[in-house]
Amino acid sequence: MLTYIKAQAASIVGSLADYAMTLFLVEILHCWYLLGNFVGNITGAIMQFILCRNWAFTAAGEPVRPQVVKFILVWVGNLALSAAGVYSLTHFLGLNYIISKTIVSVFLGLTYNYLLQKWFVFS
């Protein structure tokens, strides 16, 4: 249970970095919301990888290269699911992109990301 809580805390910190970058790009620089979502996801992923490797899963003693490769594979899946979810909720349901991003991020963080990081990336 402690690992799950730490992984969720790392996810929250990664999400904060993600949201900050997304909001900066969309609201300040007036980029398209999907581009902002993409760059935000990259920013959050880097932050989350560092925290998960060194703190949540305490896997810093393992070789970093295989972890990075596995993390990128999981992240690409997350990115595709995130983009599809944000686009669908924003375009088809008319939700604000931040609300869409929040719904999708919470769902993916509690399920897809945690499970694959625990059993595949940092195992």
Image (spheres, helix red, strand yellow):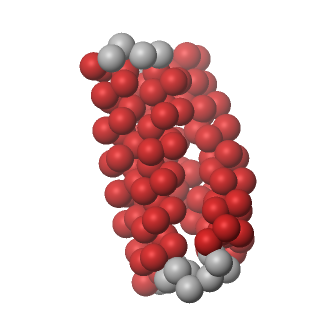
* Identity of the residue furthest to the left in this view: 28
112 or 35, nearer to the observer:
35
The x and y percentages for residue 94 are 48, 17
Residue 58 can be seen, yes or no: yes
Q: Position of residue 111 (x, y in %)?
A: 59, 60
The number of numbered discs placed on residues in the rendered structure image is 0
What x and y, as percent, mark residue 81? 65, 40
* Residue depicted at x 46% and y 59%: 48
User: Which residue is painted at 56% across and 51% down in the image?
Assistant: 108
Say which quadrant the C terminus sits in.
bottom right
Q: Is residue 51 above or below residue 108?
A: below
Relative horizontal placement of residue 16, taking residue 118 as reference (left or right): left
* Picture coordinates of residue 67, whole percent (x, y): 65, 68
**Quadrant in which residue 61 is drawn:** bottom right
Q: From this view, report whether residue 64 is shown above or below residue 58.
A: above
Residue at 69% over, 47% down = 77
Q: Is residue 33 left or right of residue 111?
A: left
Q: Residue at x 33, y 29 (%)?
A: 23
Along the horizontal axis of the image, is 117 left or right of 95? right
Relative to 18, residue 93 above or below: above
Residue 106 higher or lower than 70, as above or below: above
Looking at the image, can residue 115 be seen? no
